[in-house]
Image (cartoon, rainbow, N blue to C red):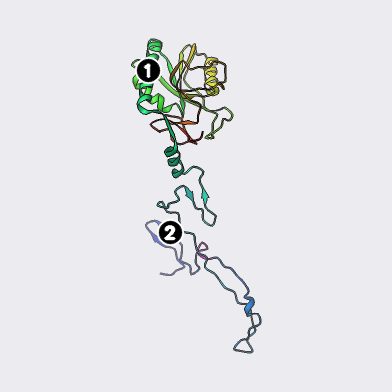
Amino acid sequence: MSNNKAIKHKGHKMRPSSSRPPLTRLAAIITATPALTNATTDSPDRGFLPIATITDLAIPPRPSLRSPHFGIIRRFGQDPIVMTDTVAEMNQVMADADCLVPEEQVHAAIDTMASAITDRLKDSNPLLFCVMNGGLILTGQLLPRLKFPVQAEYLHATRYRQETTGGILEWKLQPEADMKGRTVLIVDDILDEGTTLCAIADYCLAHGASEVLTAVLVDKEHDRKARPGLKADFTGLYVEDRFLFGYGMDYKGYWRNAPGIYAVKGL
């Protein structure tokens, strides 16, 4: 079969093979060799021409999943790009962290919260909003402890953007459920300054909620609250003013899954 004809194989067409190497394998570096400029040749009638050399460039190897530098992405022909937060770094954060509240104490606090919420809301047909992402774990732990009908929804408003200091409040997903005339319970991981919780509560009231209550696992103790004397209606734990993670709270997007309340070393 001629190489100039397309080869048919299972319905696919293959282009004729070419003697030229793929461009990704060869890079032609054409350089006149200065050392040969004044050289003599064996044949006097053969005029001297600069010699061109073609160098086969080495292709960087593909990154290995077993590389010890986990979290480093190598791009073809470019310097390595190091990811900001690697698994090794996050493991070190956990290893150095202070455990402020062990898991058993967290469970006891959630039990107490569930009991108080049940006493207050069991006959009110409440609409519960989980604040993503921080409130996810608390909501998942809390809901099975509520022995009455609950309509559970979620929303997403944040001001952290995975940084260690606060930013501008940003709505990522506004509530969709009809809250007119309803008692609304907002569940979040932490009451820090309270900017996020206040904004969500104001939104719910403006959209017809008859009552808005808040539940947080942790109230961080300091005097920087968004409103004087700001407190959640249901609070699990009061914790010192440090950079916390675990049970929904994160450090740069990691360790929401930590089984307890931890503080980053030095923060």
What is the x, y in percent for residue 237?
43, 21
Task: Say whether residue 23 is magenta.
Answer: yes
Query: Is there CB contact under 8 Å for labels 2 and 1?
Result: no
- Kind of residue indicated by mark 1: Thr
Query: Would you name the residue on which mark 2 appears?
Result: 13
Residue 172 appears in the picture as rendered: no
Furthest residue toward right: 38
Q: How many marks?
A: 2
**Residue found at x 53% / y 50%:** 81
Looking at the rendered image, the quarter that the N terminus falls into is bottom left
- Does 77 sit above or below residue 168? below
**Circle 1: is it few (<14), some (14-19), or many (20+) Cα within 10 Å?**
some
Residue 112's tag is 1
Q: Is residue 135 left or right of residue 32?
A: left
**Circle 2: is it few (<14), some (14-19), or many (20+) Cα within 10 Å?**
few
What is the x, y in percent for residue 111?
36, 19
- Front in this rendered view, residue 262 or 15: 262
Q: Secondary structure at mark 1?
A: helix
**Residue found at x 62% / y 75%:** 33
- Quadrant for residue 6, please give it: bottom left
Task: Say whether residue 188 is magenta.
Answer: no
Q: Is residue 45 left or right of residue 22?
A: right
- Kind of residue indicated by mark 2: Lys
- Does 229 sit above or below residue 65? above
- Quadrant for residue 64, please give it: bottom left
Sequence-first tag of 2 and 1: 2
Residue 123 appears in the picture as rendered: yes
- Front in this rendered view, residue 42 or 240: 240
- Quadrant for residue 127, please give it: top left
- Does 146 sit above or below residue 30? above
In this picture, which residue range is highlighted in magenta? 22-26
What is the x, y in percent for residue 183?
45, 13
